[in-house]
Amino acid sequence: MKYVFLLLLLLLVYWGSAQDPGRYDVVIHEIFADPTPSRGMPASEFIEIRNRSSTSWNLKNWTLSNGTTTGKINTSFVLKPDSMVVLCGSSAFAAFQLLGPALSVSSFPSLDNDGDTLIIASPSGNAIHALAWNRNWYGNDVKQEGGWSLEMVDISRPCLEMENWTASNDLLGATPGKKNSVQGIAIDTIPPLLLYGYLKDSITAVLLFSRPLSDSLNWPAVTEPAVAVTNKLLKPPLFKSVEITLSTPQKKEEQITIKLSSVAGCSGIRSAPQSTTTGLFSPAVKKDIVINEILFNPPIGGYDYLELYNYSKKNIDLGDLQIANRNGDRKISSITKLADFRYPLLPGEYVLISTNNDWVIQKYQPPPVKRSVQLGSMPTYPDDIGEVILLNDVGEIIDELNYDEKWHFALVSEKEGISLERISAGGTTNDPFNWHSASTSSGYGTPGYRNSQVLPEEKTQGFISLSTGIISPDMDGRDDYLLINYQFPAPGSVATITAFDSQGRAVRSIVQGALCGSSGSFRWDGLDHSGAVLPPGVYIILTEVFDLQGKTKKYRHTVAIYR
C-alpha cells in the first residue's frame, strides 16, 4: 500500500509538471511590499500565491517577476488545490517557514512600496496571473505607509483590480500561509474602457484597455477608412491589450479609426461601442511638440505640472520624448523619460505631465483629460525663473522654455497656483508676449486641454492687425489682452508701439525699438505706464515700423477698453 501511495504521489508531481496551468489557476493572493514598521511579521517582503484549480502543480521552475527582475523557484514543491505558499528571498525563508509553507525564490524581485507590476509564470513562460497594483489599493492612508500587507478579497474574481484588494485586517499586519483576513465578495460593475491605440507596424494595431478582458474576442472591429481585420490576439501578462491585424498596410502621417462593438471584461461586464483613432509613429523634430502650459509655483501641498501640445501633423510617441532643465553651468540636466511604453499623441492633442495628476485634476477640474503622464519625479522648476526642455529620443531639443514669473499678468499679486499659458502654438516659445496667466474662469489653469488664453492660428491681414477690437482686463478668459500682429516680407524691421487715449496723450509704451521677425505679435493688457488698468474708453494704437530700406511706416488702429 505504501508503494501505491508513493506511485500516486510521483504521478501527481509529474502531472503537475507536465501540463500547463490556465489563466488564473494559480493567483497572487497577498503582497507584503513594505514590511516596516513591523507589527509582528518578519521585516521582509513576501508574495503569497494560491491554487484556485482542482489540479496540484509542481512549482519547480516557476518564476516571479516585477517586469525588471525575474526570480525563480529552484526546488520541487507541490501546491495542492485551494492551498497557499509564501514566496520570499533566501534571507527571509527561515523566518517565514516558521509561519507556514514557504519557498525561497532565487533573485527574489524587490517590491516597490508605491506599486509594481507582478507576474507569476509557469515553466513554459506563460503568465498565469499578473497585476499592476499601487498604494491606493490599500484603501487606508495609515496602512499604506508600511507594516501591512495587501490581500485579495474574493478568490473567485482574480481578474479584478483595486476593487478586489485591500489592506489586511490581521493584528500582525499580514496572513502568510493562512486564509486572508478580508475575505468577502467583490462586485464588478465597471466595463472595460478603450484607452487608446497605436500602430505597432503598418498592419498591426494595438488597443489598450482600462481593465483585463475576457478570453473571448468574438466582438467585431471595423475601421475607417474600411480595412479588413484578419485577426485579434489578447496579449499577456495583464490581458489589457489586443493586437489587431489589418489586411492593408497603413502609411505614415495617415490615421485610421478603429470602431469596436460591445467588449467584454474578464468578469463578463460589457462596454458600450467604443472607438479610437491612431496611426504610424513619426519621429519628433523641432517645433512638432511645443511646451504649452506650465505651473511652476503651486500652492502649499501642490505639484508642478507641464502641458505639451502636438503642433504637427504627425503621430508622435510620447515614449520617445524626455523633459529636462538646466543646471548652474547651463548644461541640460535631470533628463526624465515620459514613458517606458508606446503612448500616442495625435495632431492637435494635449498631454498633462505631473508627479501627482490626481491632485492637478482635483485642483483645476478640467474636462476628462485624454492624455496624461504621471512621473515618479520631475526636473525642478523654480518659482521665479527656470528652464523647461523637451528632448526627443536622440537628445535633440524639440522645444525650450526659459520662463520668468514676471510674464504673469501685471495685476496678479499672488502667483501661487496660477499657470502660465502659451497664447499661440506657432509663436516664439521664449517671447514674453506669447504667454499670459491662465484665466479666473478656468480656475487659473487648463491642464490637458485647450488654453483659456489661446488665440486661433490665423494669418495676419496686411502688415499690422489687431486680434480684437476690445480689451476687458479682468482675467475671465475673454478679451483679457490685445495682440498687435505683424507680417513683413522679411525679418529685420524695427517696431515701436504706443497706446494713446482719446485726448492724444500717450498712456503706455507697449514696445520700443523691438526687432521683428517675418511675423509675430506683441501683447498689450490694457494697463498704463504705472501698471494700473486704464478707464473704459477708446484708445489709439500707433505702430511705427522702420524697415530694411530705411523707410518709416505708421499704422493706426483703435481699441476699446471696458470692464
Image (tube, rainbow, N blue to C red):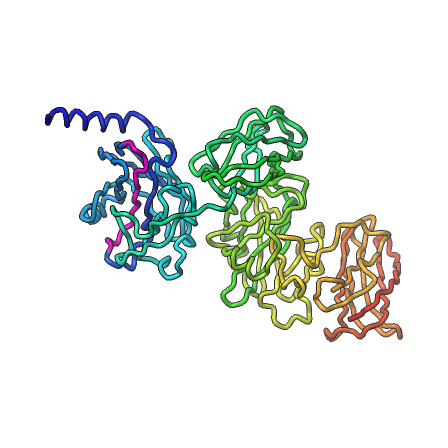
From the top left corner, tell me how far across and down residue 41 is, in percent.
24, 54
Looking at the picture, tell me which residue is in the foreground, 468 or 260: 260
Please tell me how many numbered marks the rendered image carries: 0
Looking at the picture, tell me which residue is in the foreground, 447 or 99: 99
- Residue 121 horizontal side relative to residue 412, left or right: left
Can you see residue 459?
Answer: yes
The answer to which image quadrant residue 77 occupies is top left
Does 50 lie within the magenta span? yes
From the top left corner, tell me how far across and down residue 549 is, in percent.
86, 53
Can you see residue 394?
Answer: no
At x 23%, y 28%, the residue is 12
Highlighted range, magenta: 41-55
From the top left corner, tell me how far across and down residue 408 is, in percent.
66, 65
The answer to which image quadrant residue 384 occupies is bottom right
- Residue 483 horizontal side relative to residue 413, left or right: right
Q: Is residue 324 above or below residue 554?
A: above
Looking at the picture, tell me which residue is in the foreground, 83 or 92: 83
Main secondary-structure element of the magenta-colored stretch: loop
